[in-house]
């Protein structure tokens, strides 16, 4: 992985996912972010690093959501 200012991309991923294995890092970097060049500037940040960090935070938020409960009742009192 590339180094920027003495940090690797993996180091940055571990800031958001401290227990990530090397395989986890590879998956997150290549499947859940725009690394190495697909960034949504200026919407996600002013720089590639800001965009990368936003994408990491978005993925962390996504996997932190509780799963949907298929047995929950709707406002009308029914299920699903």
Image (spheres, rainbow, N blue to C red):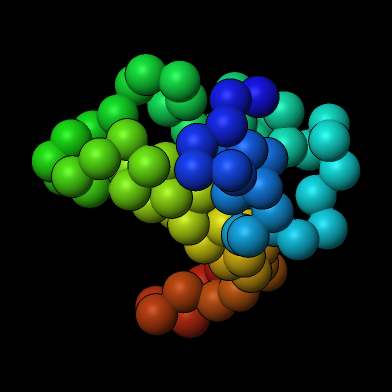
- In the picture, measured across the screen, residue 75 lies left or right of residue 29, that is left
Residue at 60% from the left image edge and 44% from the top image edge: 7
Q: Quadrant of the N terminus?
A: top right
Q: Can you give x and y, in whole percent of width and height, for residue 64 in the image?
A: 62, 65
- Asked whether 78 or 48 is in front, the reply is 48
Residue at 69% from the left image edge and 53% from the top image edge: 14
Q: Is residue 77 above or below residue 58?
A: below
Residue farthest along the left direction in this orientation: 42
- In the picture, measured across the screen, residue 31 lies left or right of residue 20, that is left
Q: Is residue 17 above or below residue 8?
A: below
Q: Is residue 62 visible?
A: no
Figure quadrant of residue 25: top right
Residue farthest along the front direction in this orientation: 6
- In the picture, measured across the screen, residue 17 lies left or right of residue 36, that is right
Q: Is residue 40 visible?
A: yes
- In the picture, measured across the screen, residue 49 lies left or right of residue 40, that is right
Residue at 18% from the left image edge and 45% from the top image edge: 46
Figure quadrant of residue 19: bottom right
Q: Can you give x and y, in whole percent of width and height, for residue 36 in the image?
A: 45, 20
Q: Quadrant of the C terminus?
A: bottom right
Residue at 55% from the left image edge and 76% from the top image edge: 73
Q: Can you give x and y, in whole percent of width and height, for residue 70 in the image?
A: 65, 61
Q: Can you give x and y, in whole percent of width and height, for residue 21 in the image?
A: 86, 43
- Asked whether 45 or 4 is in front, the reply is 4
Instruction: State how many labels appear.
Output: 0
């Amino acid at each position: 992985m590339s180094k920027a200012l003495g940090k690797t991309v993996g180091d940055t991923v571990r800031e958001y996912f401290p227990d990530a294995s090397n395989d986890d890092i590879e998956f997150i970097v290549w499947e859940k972010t725009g690394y190495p060049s697909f960034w949504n500037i200026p919407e996600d940040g002013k720089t590639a690093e800001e965009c990368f960090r936003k994408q990491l935070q978005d993925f962390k938020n996504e996997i932190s959501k509780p799963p949907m409960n298929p047995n929950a009742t709707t406002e009308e009192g029914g299920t699903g």
